[in-house]
Amino acid sequence: MTVLFFASVAQKAGVRSLALALEPGDTVARVRDRVVARFPQLESSLPTLMYALNEEYVRESAEVPAGATLALIPPVSGG
C-alpha cells in the first residue's frame, strides 16, 4: 500500500509518500499508528487529521484493502 502525506504533514515527515506492507485486518487507524511510530513528529497532527482511502474520505475504522492508497490530510484553510 501507499501512504501519501500532504501539506504540513509532508513537511513534518520530510516525505510525500511511503510504501508500507499491508497486514491482515489493517484499518486506517492501524496504518496511521505504524506511520506515527516511524515518524513520531506527526503525533501532534493526529487530532485534526482527515483520511482519504483510494480518494474517498473515510473514518479511522475503515478497513484498508490490498493495493490501497491512504492520504493523510491536515486541515487546510483558504480564502
Image (spheres, grey):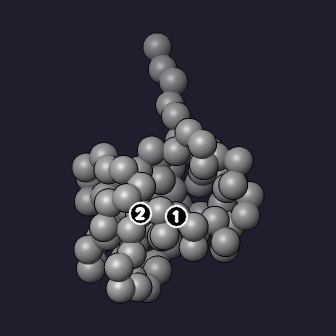
Kindly give the residue lying farthest to the top in the view shown.
79
Q: Amino acid at mark 1?
A: Arg
Q: Are marks 2 and 1 in contact (CB under 8 Å)?
A: yes
Report helix, strand or loop for mark 1. Answer: helix
65 left or right of 40 in image: left
Locate residue 25: give its quadrant: bottom left
Q: Quadrant of the N terminus?
A: bottom left
Residue pointed to by mark 2: 28
Is residue 63 in sight in this rendering?
yes
Report helix, strand or loop for mark 2. Answer: helix
Q: Nearer the viewer, residue 61 or 36?
A: 61
Q: Residues within 10 Å of mark 2 (few under 14, many from 20)?
A: many
64 left or right of 79 in image: left
- Compared with 53, 57 (above or below) is above
Residue at x 66%, y 73% (from the top left corner): 38
33 left or right of 54 in image: right
Locate residue 43: give its quadrant: bottom right
- Compared with 78, 62 (above or below) is below
Task: Name the disc covering residue 22, or none.
Answer: none
Q: Amino acid at mark 2?
A: Val
2 left or right of 5 in image: left
Q: Position of residue 72 (x, y in %)?
A: 47, 53
- Compared with 78, 45 (above or below) is below
Residue pointed to by mark 1: 32
Q: Position of residue 59 (x, y in %)?
A: 36, 50
Residue at x 67%, y 56% (from the top left corner): 42
Q: Residues within 10 Å of mark 1 (few under 14, many from 20)?
A: many
